[in-house]
Amino acid sequence: MGEIEKLRDIVRSSERIAFFGGAGVSTESGIPDFRSVDGLYHQQWDYPPETILSHSFFMEKTEEFYRFYRAKMICTDAKPNAAHLKLAQLEEQGKLTGVVTQNIDGLHQAAGSKKVFELHGSVLRNYCMKCGKFHGIESITDSEGIPRCECGGIIKPDVVLYEEGLDNDVVEGAVKAIASADTLIIGGTSLNVYPAAGLIRYFRGNNLVIINMSPTQMDSSADLLVCDKIGKVFSEI
């Protein structure tokens, strides 16, 4: 039996599927992967992206942060791909109980997924650091320099920067979804980003499926390993 057939069987027999995804889920929608060979981390800026995308850099060099953020972190014309659409369909069918994502692009919700735990936040949400008012993505895309609220406060993206902690409620929801699943599908992530990647240790179900282009540290634990693009794989199940 081929890998796709095995995956179809697993999905068919599962009642509570949780999905844990990373950058590879979005690359097929045209959003660059930070750590790929052609990704952001290999392009020339005055500072390494890890530095620019840190809390301290945001506070100290806010304008430079936004120059990078607008150029490299926002991709408003990206559309959901086959993976996003299939996951939304599985949720609608009552098979998928939650999507846990490290991505910040909102494409799972755009595809129709309702139960999405965004570990690293979303570029679509922004808030004023002074009055707390929430702003849409237009507050960033339609402004120049440092975006400001009507009250004069700086508008900050609701994304988790380096040096910042994950949201407790989001983590709690993600842990519950993973812990209660009978099947966990991990896709498009090398499982190198912590603490996010550590959440998969809560899985106690029957089927661990990993779909990724490169090896992960959990490969030896997988019941099914598929080395391919996740959108391609999901379009075939």
Image (tube, grey):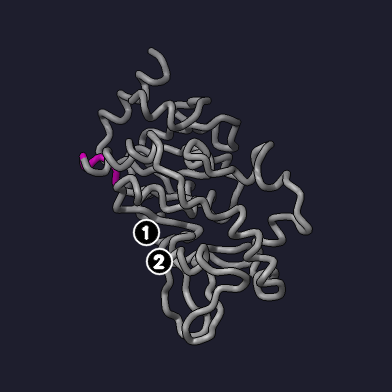
The kind of residue tagged 2 is Asp
Check residue 43 for magenta coloring.
Answer: no
Is residue 227 or residue 224 the one in the foreground? 227
Residue 216 position within the rendered picture, expressed as x and y whole percent measured from the top left: 58, 35
Q: Residue at x 72, y 61 (%)?
A: 51
Q: Which residue is mark 2?
A: 169
Whether residue 97 sits left or right of residue 122 in the image: it is left
Quote the CA–CA distance across marks 1 and 2: 6 Å
Residue 9 position within the rendered picture, expressed as x and y whole percent measured from the top left: 30, 24
Residue 193 position within the rendered picture, expressed as x and y whole percent measured from the top left: 59, 50
Q: Residue furthest left?
A: 93
Asked if 227 appears above or below 170 in the picture, the reply is above
Which mark identifies residue 202? none
Which mark identifies residue 173? 1
Question: Which quadrant does the N terminus fall into?
Answer: top left
* Range shown magenta: 93-97
Mark 1: give few (<14), some (14-19) or many (20+) Cα within 10 Å.
some
Determine the secondary structure under disc 1.
helix
Question: Which quadrant does the C terminus fall into?
Answer: top left
The kind of residue tagged 1 is Gly
Check residue 95 for magenta coloring.
Answer: yes
Residue 144 position within the rendered picture, expressed as x and y whole percent measured from the top left: 59, 69
Q: Residue at x 55, y 63 (%)?
A: 160
Determine the secondary structure under disc 2.
helix
Asked if 140 appears above or below 98 in the picture, the reply is below
Quarter holding residue 37: top right
Asked if 90 appears above or below 118 in the picture, the reply is above
Whether residue 228 sits left or right of residue 53 in the image: it is left
Please report contact status of discs 1 and 2: CB closer than 8 Å, yes or no. Answer: yes
Asked if 152 appears above or below 112 in the picture, the reply is below
Whether residue 58 sits left or right of residue 2 in the image: it is right
Mark 2: give few (<14), some (14-19) or many (20+) Cα within 10 Å.
few
